[in-house]
Image (cartoon, rainbow, N blue to C red):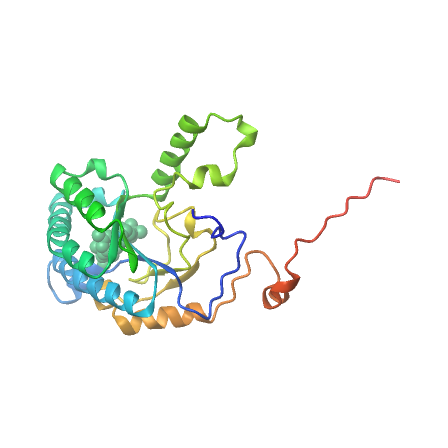
Amino acid sequence: MPKGLNSTRETPKTNIVPQHIAIIMDGNGRWAKNRLMPRVAGHKQGVEAVRDVIKACVERGVRYLTLFAFSSENWRRPEDEVSFLMQLFVGALEQEVAKLHENDICFKVIGDVSKFESKIIRFISDGESLTANNTRLTFTIAANYGGRWDILQATKKMIAQQKKSLEDYQEEDLTQYLAMSYAPEPDLFIRTGGECRISNFLLWQLAYTELYFTDALWPDFDVHALDQAIHSYQQRERRFGRTSEQVLQPATHKPSEVVVKSDA
Ligand code: IPE
Ligand code: IPE
Ligand code: MG
C-alpha cells in the first residue's frame, strides 16, 4: 500500500470524488433470465456496462477503478458458462487494451492468473506492459481472485523474503505483497445485483471502505447509477475510529495519551 494511504492513519475527505472505486459486478445472469435469454447473454451485455463505467470514472477524475470479473469460487459454475466467460475475457483483452492505452489508462490484473490458459496469460502480461506508464486511470480486473488467496500468498512471500523474528512483523510488512500493493485502499465499494456480501473480494483492503449496495443488475448499471453511488459516498463521514468532533476539527487530531497510574 503506498505510504500515507493506510486507512488507519488518514481521514480522507468524502465530499470529493473517491480516488479508488472497487465494484462487484453482479446480476448478469438474472438480467438475462428476466429477458428469457441464456445467462451468458447477461455477461456479454455486462461488458458494455464496463466500458461506460470506465469512461465515466475517467471523466469524474477517479484514479483507480477495480472490477471483480471472476472469483476463485466461480470455477464451481457449469463448465460451459466458465468457458464462455474465458472467451469473453480473451475477446475483451484483444479489443480493448489498445483503446485503454490510447486513453492513457494503465491496465492491471490481480488474481492467480497461472490457472488461465497460456493465451490469456500472454494477453494480460502484454496489456500490462503496454500500459504500464499510463497515468490517467489505473483500471484493474480481478480475475481468479480471492481475498483469502491474496492474504495467504502475501504471507508466504513476506515470510520467505523478510526472515524477521515473529514479533517484529508489522502490517506494512504484509501489505507490500498484496496483489494491489500499487493502489490505495478503495474509498468506495459498490456491489450491484442486490446481494449484501463481499464474496471474498478485497478482504484486507476493504477494512474501512465505504460500502454501497444497489439492486441494479450489472448490465443496467449506468453513469446515473454510478453518480448515485458517488453521491451516497459524499454524504458519509469517515472516522476510522475517531469521534465525529475530531474529524470535523482535524487540528486537534492528536492521539490521546493513556496515563497508566501505578498502584498507590
Ligand atoms: C456476475 O453476474 C458475473 C460473474 C460472477 C462472472 P452473475 O453471473 O453472478 O449473475 P447472477 O448473480 O447469477 O444474476
Ligand atoms: C461475485 O459474484 C464474483 C464476481 C462478480 C466476479 P458471485 O455471483 O459469484 O457471488 P456469490 O457467489 O453469489 O456471492
Ligand atoms: Mg451472482
What residue appears at the point 41 percent right and 60 percent down from the top-left corner? 211
Quadrant location, the C terminus: top right
In the rendered structure, the answer to whether residue 135 lies left or right of residue 43 reads right
Estimate the x, y position of residue 60 in percent, counting from the top left.
32, 69
Q: Is residue 203 above or below residue 28?
A: above
Estimate the x, y position of residue 83 in percent, counting from the top left.
12, 45
Q: Is residue 141 above or below residue 221?
A: above
Q: Nearer the viewer, residue 49 or 8?
A: 8
In the rendered structure, the answer to whether residue 240 lies left or right of residue 180 reads right
Estimate the x, y position of residue 231 in percent, counting from the top left.
40, 72
Q: Residue 250 falls in which quadrant of the image?
A: bottom right
In the rendered structure, the answer to whether residue 74 lies left or right of residue 183 reads left
Most extreme residue toward the front is 133
What residue appears at the point 66 percent right and 56 percent down from the top-left corner? 254
In the rendered structure, the answer to whether residue 97 lies left or right of residue 56 reads left
What residue appears at the point 23 percent right and 39 percent down from the top-left corner? 113
Most extreme residue toward the bottom is 224
Most extreme residue toward the right is 264
Count up the numbered dots.
0
Estimate the x, y position of residue 51 in percent, counting from the top left.
20, 63
